[in-house]
Amino acid sequence: MTPWEIRATEFANCNCAYGCPCQFNAPPTYGHCQAVVCNEVISGHHGDVKLDGLRFGGVFSWPGAIHEGNGKAQPFVDERATEEQRDAILRIMSGEDTDPMATVFAVFASTLSEVYDPIFAPIAFEVDVEARRGHFVVPGVAECHGEPIRNPVTGAEHRARIDLPNGFEYEIAEMGSGSSKTHGKIELTLANSYGQFARLHLNNHGVIKHRAL
């Protein structure tokens, strides 16, 4: 197993209601799951291959709950990545070089029945986790926008977080409202649904903890 570690900023948008029942081991809001996610590596490596500054993500669709399987995925990777970096990122995303079910990448990979060829493209990415604001664009693949949830009466920004001390993706995620449009093999239209802003710190053994339980 090649050791790897990444610190990354993540923005994800899925079709569930705010809060996303999946985070609480409950069925998805509408009985199926659709999602698009992008990460920007702050610092990281896969073996001796540095991954600093690179971006990657995917578009996903499952006909039922994620754990029921039969999902499809369209991975995308920063076109700036070298061949070595592309291979490293795809190995991480596919759950290779990772303890079984130790990371979100490994968990998702285990539920997929079809993974399309990765797309290498320029990825524009700008996310402020605390502000619950951000966007990313992968030309011809996905355009995603996130903003704070609004109080339906006053219009004021609402802040809520999910704390998962024993999670496989993050320790704390900020909740927001996401809207996305994807193209190609998996076409999604999401509007004002679950938006997740988080800082990830993962290695091949799982989430690296920074907080007491």
Image (cartoon, rainbow, N blue to C red):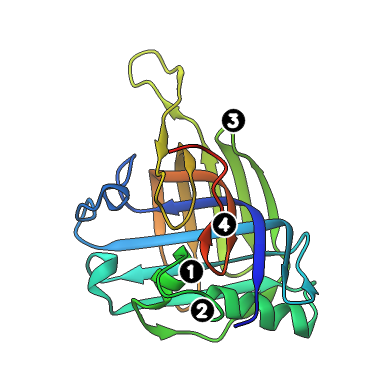
Q: Give the quadrant of residue 168.
A: bottom left
Residue highlighted by disc 1: 105
Identify whether 4 is placed above or below 43: below
Which tag is nearer the camera, tag 3 or tag 4? 3
Q: Are marks 1 and 2 in contact (CB under 8 Å)?
A: yes
Disc 3 residue type (three-letter): Ala
Badge 1 or badge 2: first in the primary sequence:
2
Return the mark for residue 143.
4
- Distance of mark 2 from mark 3, alpha carbons? 30 Å
CA separation in Å, label 1 and label 3 = 26 Å
Circle on res. 94: 2
**Which amino acid type is marked by label 1?**
Phe
Q: Secondary structure at mark 4?
A: strand
Q: How far across and down, in percent of the image, does residue 84 sit?
A: 76, 83
Q: Depth check: give the residue in front, 48 or 40.
A: 48
Q: Position of residue 213 (x, y in %)?
A: 42, 38
Drawn side of residue 17 relative to residue 187, left or right: left
Real-space CA distance between mark 1 and mark 4, rounded to the nearest whole angstrom: 22 Å
Sequence-wise first label, 1 or 4: 1
Decide which of tag 2 and tag 3 comes sooner along the chain.
Answer: 2
